[in-house]
Image: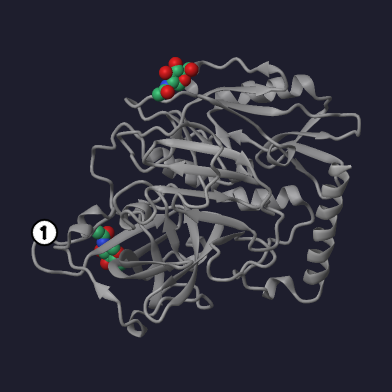
Amino acid sequence: MKAYFILFSALHIFIIVTTTMGAYDPCSSQPDDSDLTLIPIYAKCSPFDPHPPATDSWVNTVLTMASKDPQRLTYLSSLVGRKSSAPIASGQAFNIGNYVVRARLGTPAQLMFMVLDTSSDEAWVPCSGCTGCSTTTTTFSPRDSSSFGSLYCSAPQCSQVRGLSCPATGSAPCSFNHSYAGSSFSAKLVQDSLKLAYDVIPHFSFGCIDSISGGPGLVPSQGLLGLGRGPMSLLSQSGSLYSGVFSYCLPSFKSYYFSGSLKLGPKGQPRRIRTTPLLRNPRRPSLYYVNLTGVSVGRVLVPVRSELLGFNPYTGSGTIIDSGTVITRFVEPVYSAIREEFRRQVEGPFSSIGAFDTCFVKRYETLAPIITLHFTGLDLKLPFENSLLHSSSGSLACLAMAAAPNNVNYVLNVIANLQQQNLRILFDTVKNKIGIARELCN
Ligand SMILES: *[C@@H]1O[C@H](CO)[C@@H](O)[C@H](O)[C@H]1NC(C)=O
Ligand SMILES: *[C@@H]1O[C@H](CO)[C@@H](O)[C@H](O)[C@H]1NC(C)=O
């Protein structure tokens, strides 16, 4: 009886919500300032152009989104390479994320939709007058902000930036260059107040891009907010404000709206959540490593050598959770083992679509096995939405994971966006744990 009542109430609320939403264009609805909502960059209501790449099939849409993954994997793995003590070449690669959050910079505040990136430290935005930036994009105008400040090479923050191009002597502005695939940009490190929801971080240091070469296509057009663990990241720069804690819930790729959320600080975080230790790789302390100990397909624990999954602080190998890669990638032997076991349990024949090599005709009696990621102290059973992609007609399903590209020549597995949809992922950099819980945030 009680259950019926709850169900009824839930339906009731649902009806009210849908009726209200039906009254006006949901894309025009703006959540209030207290909300750090997230939206997939390709979503229908995303402020970015072009909107979802128009393809006839959902699988192809995701493949388009994932087309930058190999470069990102190369970038991420370059961070943990054996030679990481060698100076990082100028033109350090940067990387693209897929979810954007509203941030306000300067006084009075200028709204920017910045990409969220857990594997970057520095934040940066295109600044007015930028040459080579997309002509349609919103840029940050330092001239219109009364709290704006420049930083010179002598500033302590300046030495923390990658790809620095400060002369050995003199007091030049703190400049740096980053590059990504065909594009590269040069920026100056500056300071201004950053407003996220109701929080203000005064004197926040970020890159102000003044030129992009090689085409703006790959550079997030309104900038990027780094949520890594390094000294230039939001967590470090906000001092005690967030106590080194944040979480996000990434909405489904199919979500249209700003419905995901970023929660900064310990307040409002789930109290009861299963956790796994957050590990730190001394070679690249910014990345969020977890100890992946095994992968199950259905009830079968896939046989893989533990050194292909587990954390090794000496080589930098292991598994990271990343907010900017689209499809989870495992090193080749691990992916093959998962795929073989999956194929054993699902009726073929199998075909390939782009990076997905295990697509099959979904008969209604075919129940695909559940994929479980085993972390130290936490098993994550992936919902079907996070392990299978369905073609638009619904007849074909693909295993939504892939092998890491061949040029990544040491072990790095990346748990990516598609596998994180509708989960709350909590990062606690003080107690060193990562929590994961189911949460619908579509
Ligand atoms: C950074 O880029 C600018 C503009 O493209 C160029 O003039 C400068 O030499 C570059 N600096 C480094 C260190 O590569
Ligand atoms: C990772 O898990 C393996 C297997 O359970 C364990 O032997 C190892 O100590 C763990 N490593 C860390 C750093 O927790």
Seen as rendered, the residue at the extreme front is: 1
Looking at the picture, does residue 278 appear above or below residue 191?
Answer: above
Residue 248 spot, x, y in % from top left: 54, 50
Task: Tell me the quarter of the picture where residue 99 sits.
Answer: bottom right
Looking at this view, name the residue that lies furthest to the bottom. 144
Q: Which quadrant of the picture is home to ligand 2?
A: top left
The reply, left or right, for residue 44 in relation to residue 277 is right
Write down the residue under mark 1: 168
Q: Nearer the viewer, residue 74 or 98?
A: 98
Q: Amino acid at mark 1?
A: Ala
Determine which quarter of the picture holds residue 52: bottom right
Q: Residue at the spot x=68%, y=28% of the render?
A: 371
Q: Could you tell me if residue 301 is visible in this image?
A: yes
Residue 358, given in percent of the width and then of the height, sits at 73, 32
Horizontal side of residue 231 vs 414, given as left or right: left
Instruction: Give the quarter of the figure containing the C terminus.
Output: bottom right
- What kind of element bears circle 1? loop
Task: Tell me where residue 385 appears, x and y as whole percent.
Answer: 72, 42
Q: Quadrant of the N terminus?
A: top right
Residue 332 position in % (x across, y down): 56, 27
- Residue situated in front as seen by the camera: 220 or 293: 293
